[in-house]
Amino acid sequence: MASQGKKLINNPNDVVTEFIEGLVETYPGLQYLDGFPEIKVVLRSDHVSAMLDKVAIISGGGSGHEPAHAGFVGEGMLSAAICGEVFASPQVDAILAGIRAVTGPMGCLLIVKNYTGDRLNFGLAAEQAKSEGYKVETVIVGDDCALPPPRGIAGRRGLAGTILVHKVAGAAAAAGLSLDEVAAEAKRASEMVGTMGVALSVCTLPGHVTSDRLGPGKMELGLGIHNEPGAALADLQPVEVVVSHVLQQILSPETNYVPITRGNRVVLLVNGLGATPSMELMIAAGKAVPQLQLEHGLAVDRVYTGSFMTSLDMAGFSISIMKADEAFLQRLDAATKAPYWPVGVDDTFSLLLGNRPPAKIPVPLPVSHSAKSDESLSRPQQLSKQGYLLEVAIEAGVNAVIDLRDNLNKWDGRVGDGDCGSTMYRGATAILEDMKKHYPLNDAAETVDEIGSSVRRVMGGTSGILYTIFCKAACAQLKANTQSPVTSKQWAEALEASIAAVSKYGGASAGFRTLLDALIPASAVLQERLNAGDDPCSAFLVSSEAAVAGAESTRHMQAQAGRSTYISSDILATVPDPGAMAAAAWYRAAALAIKNNQFHE
């Protein structure tokens, strides 16, 4: 029977901000940005000097996993941690604030756990930061070994192995490596680590009732850190048996999740999930080491045991195994001032309370806000030819989406949650309204950026984030070219960059039954026709036909992204993908508008 969980808290809505306040009071080497409640960012108090000649390392995600991620902020690990609400991805504005606060000329690396919300929000923030002139790279960590290789693009979940990636990246940055070098080391570390968790109980969110899903005498293998169901429910077994099962799962040659074979050197991390006593964690570690050595033929070079990435008050533990070499061991052994890394913590700040830095500092404003004049972000009194064509193309595209609303909802009702048309309608109407007021139509890059801002303001869900990423990437590509007006080839390159960004952060590619199945063939045909010397308007029009054909072809595709993943192929065959049809509609309408108005003076 479910009951109200007991918590030592005040208002459940304030737990994250009050945690941050307590954290910086405890560790004077940490600060937070003064942007509560929307912006919850913990950063190094020496970040100003660090950002001058070092790559910044930024991570974060939903709260409830403490000490991750804020407890690993400090010299030699993270430069900043972005905290969302409990089990909820942080907002894009908070991530951007963190990037602006700690990123200097060397750039920053975002380390992101593989969850859709984190991927999309950090991805959008990265694109926005790039458009502001920051150098940003991203590494996605998916170290979960509990579930079979997933269907579609969801991928493996990010778990406690992420902490080892933080340490490798932080040490590489502290050593003065370039952004590309730091990102390469972090990516390699993410590919060498595997994790699996075992839970004896589910956790209780602040203000919620405690679930009794597991029942007495049961344990769940592969339970996620957000209470997601695991791979299997089993009878409780002695820890030695549990550890053996976990190690076999991580090191299984059938799944080949980690490239570890007999004779390799490894690092072991035993992680408590929040309510597991140190005694039990040490017992698990003590059983894991000899099993790794004797049963799997591995040399265990380092063992870290404690609570690194928890799930509130969940009882249980996870085990992470990382393939080690001298380079990784050097990074793991490097000094750090991150308060929750188990070794090498420097308490210098604690000894200097008289010179303690302030607990919080102001939220930084984007450089672009101060650099842009009001005139540059307002509708010009006189439109250039390019400005006029841009206006008619935008107007035609969004009106096509508006006219398609009911059909989009109908199709989405068959394969999704039935709101694709309504969501796209909100974005389209916002673009129309904002264009009349302040789109700087004579500046193509800024106009595309403003379209992204309109979409981001009103469109919810995955579609809103993906279209915002699309616009931010196009804007960045257009800004990289200094020619005015923008050439047809540059527009084609911007489309290609947008598709690449959506694919990178959303995970989809051609054939996944998404909007990209309309845009990828359109981009290919556009490039092909322009390279063949076709008139740009004709090339655009022909490419729009490819977009429509690509969208229609989604009827014959098995979904590998979104809610459609769970729909049978028989049902999917009755309707095209709504997102692809919407993309084809606006693209085709824009091409026709350009063709019909190309001779306007």
Image: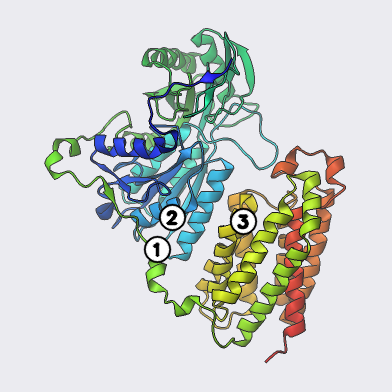
User: Is the residue under label 2 in contact with that under label 1 (CB below 8 Å)?
Assistant: yes
Nearest to the observer: residue 389 or residue 134: 389
Q: Residues within 10 Å of mark 3 (few under 14, many from 20)?
A: many
- The tally of labels here is 3
Residue placed under numbered mark 2 in the picture? 96
Q: Position of residue 481 (x, y in %)?
A: 53, 75
Residue 469 seen in the current view? no
Amino acid type, label 1: Pro
Residue placed under numbered mark 3 in the picture? 459
Amino acid type, label 3: Met
Q: Secondary structure at mark 3?
A: loop
Q: Is residue 277 left or right of residue 384?
A: left
Residue placed under numbered mark 1 in the picture? 366
Q: Secondary structure at mark 1?
A: loop
Q: Residues within 10 Å of mark 2 (few under 14, many from 20)?
A: many
Q: Position of residue 14 (x, y in %)?
A: 40, 38
| Residue at the (59%, 22%) spot, across then down | 249
How far is the residue under mark 3 from the one under mark 2? 19 Å
Looking at the rendering, which quadrant does residue 285 occupy? top left
